Image (spheres, rainbow, N blue to C red):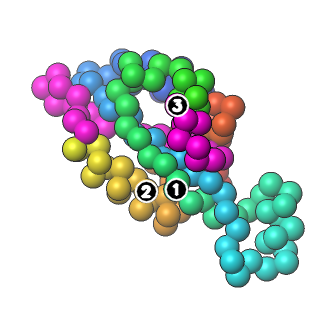
Amino acid sequence: MNIASYADLISAACAQAEPQRLLFVFVRAELPDDATAAQKTEFAAGEGGALAPVLCIDKLPAEQPSFEGLVLESQSTGIDWHLVFVTSMSGRAGIAPGGDEADQALKMMVESVKQGSIGNFLAFDRSGTVVSLA
């Protein structure tokens, strides 16, 4: 399925044979302390930098059906972010994964983001646009 929006993500999650739990890792672009002058210039132009996880949550699809709601909820934390990576976990026997299962999966997802292994995640910017990162 081609997911072109957050609404598509929710629809896809709800259409699965087993209940899903969505995992979200919010990241902020940061410039390393040892950045070169060229890296600083790129970063000032809105390019480059490193993605640093700053917040993670898990939700059932019905708990956050709109991207606008997700943004509002994240704003209540006071933590600034630039992108959010999303993936899902499948339940078993008609039961969605629990919070304990999600905690471990979120830890692994955060580590993947830190290592730059983001190919298995969807990425959305703050406006809800799907972002493709090279």
Helix, strand or loop at mark 3: helix
Per the image, the residue denoted by label 2 is 110
Q: Residues within 10 Å of mark 1 (few under 14, many from 20)?
A: many
Q: Give the residue displayed 79% in from the left and 62% down from the top.
A: 43
Ranked by sequence position, the earlier of labels 3 and 2 is: 3
The answer to whether residue 33 shows anywhere in this view is yes
Please provide percent x and percent y for residue 77. 53, 41
Instruction: Determine the CA span between mark 1 and mark 3.
Output: 17 Å
Amino acid, disc 2 = Val
Per the image, the residue denoted by label 1 is 53
Picture layout, residue 80 above or below residue 19 = below
Magenta stretch: includes residue 93: yes
Helix, strand or loop at mark 1: strand
Q: Give the residue displayed 58% in from the left and 31% down from the top.
A: 71
Per the image, the residue denoted by label 3 is 73
Magenta stretch: includes residue 78: yes
Q: Nearer the viewer, residue 91 or 83?
A: 83
Instruction: Determine the CA span between mark 3 and mark 2.
Output: 20 Å
Q: Which residues are magenta?
A: 73-99
